[in-house]
Image (spheres, helix red, strand yellow):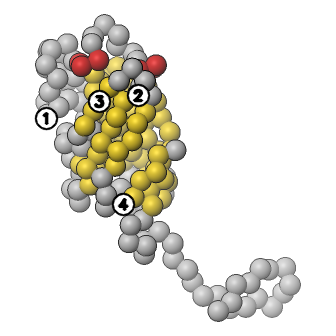
Amino acid sequence: MIQATTKTDLTFYLQTEDNRIDTSVDSSKIRHLVKFTNDMDKSVQYAYSSVHDITNRYTKFVFTYNANPDVYTGDINFLPAGYWKYEVFEVSWTGAVAISAGNAPVTEDDVLPVGPTHGVVQGLVTKGKMYVAEKDGTQQVTYTQREEPSGTNYIYYGQ
């Protein structure tokens, strides 16, 4: 499970090469589109990482905190805090890799016109859970004072 904190940058490592789909191109022509889905409010953010280093065993992903998320620059904003799902999609290029509008798909269903600088989503390579802790400590849990129950079948936490 990936551990993250709201309002901070995020770096994590995932095994992607074992599940590689488009083996006809070099690893330098591969990027990964990450879909983050919040379990509580079902909000979705897509992003390409700002640092994307593929090695034989893992891929390093780096995302930067920004109040205004941007799929192309790797800017993310994990609010609300709590559990999120992540899905990693392989995107391949035949020519120069261009992570920009019109050249990189913004969702797993996005199909761009055929061209060497246009990325093609090959498919899902990995998925998992991520826990985002709250940096400020006020958003995630709200406690409400309750009256003491009259019965004996309850656990009561008083003042």
Q: Secondary structure at mark 2?
A: loop
The residue tagged 2 is 58
Q: Amino acid type of disc 3?
A: Asp
- Label 3: which secondary element: strand
The earlier-in-sequence mark between 2 and 4 is 4
Indicate the amino acid at tag 2: Tyr
Q: CA distance from mark 2 to mark 4?
A: 25 Å
Tell me where residue 104 sits by quadrant. Answer: top left
Q: In the visual, does 19 lie left or right of 61?
A: right
Mark 3 or mark 1: which comes first in sequence?
Answer: 3
Q: Is label 4 in a helix, a strand or a loop?
A: loop
Provide residue 14's location: percent of width, then percent of height.
43, 33
Looking at the rendered image, the quarter that the C terminus falls into is: bottom right
Residue 116 vs residue 32: left or right? Answer: left
x then y, percent, for residue 149: 76, 88
Q: Quadrant of residue 134?
A: bottom left
Q: Which residue sits at x=39%, y=58%?
A: 5
Instruction: Name the residue that disc number 4 marks.
Output: 6
Q: CA distance from mark 4 to mark 1?
A: 27 Å
Disc number placed over residue 53 in the picture, else none: 3
Residue carrying label 1: 101
